[in-house]
Structures are given as C-alpha cells and as structure tokens.
Amino acid sequence: MATANWQWLLRWRWEAALAVCILVSVGVFALSETSRIRLTDSYDDAIRSMWVTERLGDLASRVIEAESGQRGYLLVRRPVYLESYDAALPKIAELRRAIRDHYVTRGDLKQTQAFDEVSGRIGTKLSELEQTLKVGQQGRSELALQVMGTDAGQRSMDRIRAGIAALQTHERERTHALVEEWRSGLQLSRAGVAAITALNIVLLVLIMRWMKRDWLRARDREQELDRMVQQRTTQLANLASYLHEVSETEKTRLGRELHDELGATLTAVKMDVAWTRGKLAPGQRALAEKLERAARNLDMCIQVKRRIIEDLRPTTLANFGLMTAARELAEQTAERAGWKLKLELPDEDPDLPEETAIALFRILQETLNNAIKYAKASTVRISLVGGLGECVVEIEDDGVGFNPRNVRAKASGLVGMRQRVEPHGGRFYVTSQPGRGTLVRVSVPLRKEPPPVEPETSRAGPPASEGELFG
C-alpha cells in the first residue's frame, strides 16, 4: 500500500508541486493583504488617537483663553480683551462637537461618558464666565470682581484640566498600544513572509531537482535510443551491403552458368541444326525451312542470353573498366530513348575498388532507367570527375522533374541507390523541382594508396632488427 502511494506521488509530483506553489502564492497574497489591512487600521487608529490628544489640549487652551479674556476685561475694562474671549467660544464649541463625534464613531462608550463629563464642566465654566461678564457690563463691577476673587473658578478649571489630562493620558496609552500592536503585526507579517518564502525556496529546489533528474533520464533515454538507432542503422547498412554483395555474386554466378551451360548448349544445338540442314536432300524443302527457322530462333535465344548476361554482369565492365561500360550503357540508352547525350567522362578509370565501381554502374543503370520511365527528357548529361580523394558522378536531365518530399514511401529506387553507395563511404544526393529536371549526384572515396616505402639506405653498423623497425 505504501509503495502504491509512493508511486502515485511520483506520478503526480509535478501537479502536486504546482498545486502547492499556487496555494503558497495565494497564502502569501492573503497574508500580505491581511497584514496590510491590520497595519493600516492600527496606523489610522494611532493617528486618530494623536489627533484627539492634540484636540483635547487645544480645547483646554481655548477654555483658558476664554477665561483670561473675561478676567482681563473685568479688570481693566478694555474691549480688546473681549476679542480673545469671543474668538475662543466658537472654537470651544467646534472642538467639543468634533471630539465627541470621534468617541461616538469609535464606539468607545466609557471614553464618551468621560468626555461628556468634562464637556459638561466646560459648559458650566463657560456659563459662569458669561454671567460674571454680564454682571460687570451692567455696571456692577465690584460684584463681578468679588465673584472672580473666589476660588470657585479655580476649582472648576482644575477639574477641567484634570479631566482633559485623564483623557489625554488614555489616548497616549492607546496610541502606544496601537504602535506596539502595529510593530508586533509587522514582525508577524515579516515572519510569515519569511516562512512562506523559505517554503517556496524548498519547493523550487525540489522542482529543480526533479527537473534535473527527469532531464538526465530523458537524456539517457535519448542517448540509448540514439545508440539503438545507430546500431540498427549500422546493422541495416551492413545487411543492405551484404544483400547487394550477395545479389552481385548471385548475378555473377548466374551469368557464368548461363554463359557456360546455356551458351554451350545453344551453340551445340545450332551446330546440330546446321549439320542437319547440310544433310537434307534437295527435295526436302519444307524440312529445310523448319530447320532454317529453328536456326533463327536459336540466334535470337543466343542474343537474349547475351543481353541477360550483360544485364546481370556486364562483361564490358569486367573486361574494360567503368568508363567504357558507362559510355556504352549511356550511348545505348540514349539511342533507345532518343536523347541528346552529353558525356563528360575521363579517358582512364578512377582508382576505385571493384565493389565501388559495380555500385556506381548500378546507380547509373537505375538512374537512366528512371529517366526513361518518368523524366520525359530531351537531353541527358553524364559527368564523372575524380580527384581530391573522391570520385563524383553526376547524371542530369532536363525532364519534368519532381518534388523529392512527395516521393511515395514505397518507392524504393532512391533508397536502394543510397543504400548501394553508403556502405562504400559515399554520399548520394538528388536535386529536383517540378519542370526543372533532375540532378543525381554520387560521390565515393577513391582507393587509398599505400604510403611509399622508403628504400633502405646503407648505414654504418649492423642492419636494424624487426623490433627496431616497428617499435
């Protein structure tokens, strides 16, 4: 069971790794987004707490400013002091409303109640200032100053300051707590990102290892397939070479037997027919005609026998060499097909092994036969050039041509010609286009000449031994 699960995991490891990477990426995004929202909220809360702290301080200053303006006016009776008093009142009302809205919006009931208490004291203080100011403006300055001389106003201001200070202290503590929360959230976010990054690195390392292992396996399989293909190709090439050699050997044997056995028999029969014709009486005209017709048939059989032997193993190639056999084959084929022939053949045969010369002759035969069947050509050029270590044969016609890519898979002519030349270290090319003729080019290496043996020169002392000559 465990083995089956492991095999299943190996089979789907790429999909599993991809799924984990997607989940990790989604996790990174979700974690970063959550951390961003949490940090943003903490930052906004801290900013609002600092804003409230600042507004509370501003509120206390405005109340003190209003009290100072009222006292200054009552003491020196100069209207300029009322300007600061009048300017502080709307600011105080605005600050009381803004701060309370903040607490209500935040949903902090306790602080809302605490601020309402402080705001009520401020309202009471402002009412006392306004009443005292009205008493002074009505001409009862002494009564107003007596009210100012009591410590009731001082006690109310102390309670206001104490309430505002308590609210400010609470906001500072809250700001400090939010900052600490923001820092801890930032650290947690960084730790989460670091952990997910480490997980991603681990996954990438695993994926790279799997990729490398799969690549190495694929490379090994590819190399093994290349070796197998190369081995099979070599075997097929050797088999093709062997089959060609067997075919040529069989053709040679069959041609020899036809020449020796059938040729001798046909010659003997022709001699017997000729002898019988000579023994006939003058009145045996019908028998003479039969024997004459038999003699003609024998001559035809002898010609067919010669042609078959020439096709199996050209005697011209064996007796006079490749150039003579190629020239004779080209001229006979051109005469039969009605071509204009252009021969570019050297006078002497290139230095080729016998098997290579036979292969070139067979390729020439096959190419000319294909040209008769399919090319519809009017001119054929045959060229042979030997030099620079190779022999190059070209057969070119101006026929209809064809597309080499569209050659039928079962057409074995081109494949057979290539297989004939490759075992001899040669190369086979076909260049053709529809309407532009065909060029067949074959190149084979010449026979390697043995290195020249330097004549032994006389030297002083005894001759070198065999071990000294060959190391």
Image: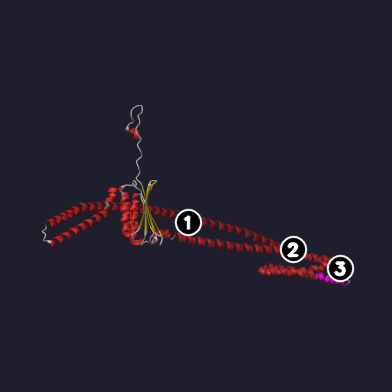
Q: Find residue 413 and report its horizontal and vertical position in percent.
A: 33, 58
- Report the side of 112 relative to 205 (left or right): right
The answer to whether mark 2 and mark 3 are in CB contact below 8 A is: no
Up the image or down, 191 lies above or below 89; here it is above
Local crowd size for mark 2, using a 10 Å CA cut-off: few (<14), some (14–19), many (≥20): some
User: Residue at the location (58% across, 59% down)?
Assistant: 189
- Residue kind at label 3, given as amino acid type: Pro
- Residue 371 location, quadrant: bottom left
The residue most toward the front is: 282
Q: Find residue 12 and report its horizontal and vertical position in percent.
A: 43, 61
Per the image, label 3 sits on a secondary structure element best described as loop
Label 1 or label 3, whichever comes before in sequence order? 3
Per the image, label 1 sits on a secondary structure element best described as helix
Q: Find residue 135 and report its horizontal and vertical position in percent.
A: 85, 71
Give the residue pinned by disc 2: 57
Up the image or down, 73 lies above or below 305; here it is below
State how far apart marks 1 and 3 are (Cα): 85 Å
What is the chief secondary structure element of the magenta stretch?
Answer: helix
Q: Find residue 139 and report its horizontal and vertical position in percent.
A: 89, 71
Per the image, label 2 sits on a secondary structure element best described as helix
Of marks 2 and 3, the one in the foreground: 3
Label 2 or label 1, whichever comes before in sequence order? 2
User: Does the rendering let one see residue 333?
Assistant: yes
- Residue range in magenta is 128-138
- Residue kind at label 1, given as amino acid type: Ile
Give the residue pinned by disc 1: 207
Residue 79, numbered label: 3
